[in-house]
Image (tube, rainbow, N blue to C red):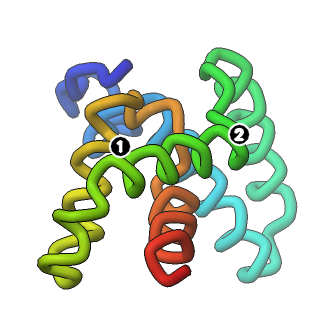
Amino acid sequence: MFARPVPAAYAPGFQRCYSLTTYVLAQLDAAAQFNQASRPDLAGKERQEADFLDRFLPPLLPQADIDRILKEIVTEQISLIQTDPRKAIGKVFKAFYSRVDKASVDPDLVKRRAEAILAA
């Protein structure tokens, strides 16, 4: 899913974006900043572009599926997690992303759910 960066000379707006997902997130962030700066016209333009591009992205994995996969991983690696709890989250992330494509999940949601499952 991740594309190569487009050279700045060809597409200035894409110079720091490595995927369509990050570009859409950057546009939504820009829209929020334009709203804070009392520029609803520019915010609307950014939101429209983000909505248009969002139609081409695959749907994100639902929270229920993320929880199911994380619980399976924790169950499989319970002995490793109990021996070194400081490294548990890293091991869980490594196992999770070996099963799931990073582009198909919200990384913040995965982190929150993993922390909640490990705390339980």
> Badge 2: few (under 14), some or many (20 or more) residues near its Cα, within 10 Å?
few
Which quarter of the figure has residue 103? top left
Q: Secondary structure at mark 1?
A: helix
**What residue lies at 35% left-to-right and 43% top-to-bottom?**
96
For this view, does 91 lie left or right of residue 23?
left
Mark 2 residue type? Pro
Image quadrant holding the N terminus, namely top left
> Badge 1: few (under 14), some or many (20 or more) residues near its Cα, within 10 Å?
many
Q: Secondary structure at mark 2?
A: loop
Q: Which mark is drawn over residue 96?
A: 1
Is 108 or 28 nearer to us in this picture?
108
Which quarter of the figure has residue 55? top right
- Spot occupied by residue 17 in the image (x, y as percentages of width and height): 33, 40
Q: Please say if 35 is above or below 75.
A: below
Residue bearing mark 2: 62
Give the label, 2 or 1, closer to the camera.
1
Mark 1 residue type? Phe
Q: Please say if 80 is above or below 57.
A: below
**What residue lies at 61% left-to-right and 22% top-to-bottom?**
57
- Report if the CB atoms under discs 2 and 1 are less than 8 Å apart: no
N-terminal-most mark, 2 or 1: 2
For this view, does 98 lie left or right of residue 23?
left
Q: Please say if 58 is above or below 116.
A: above
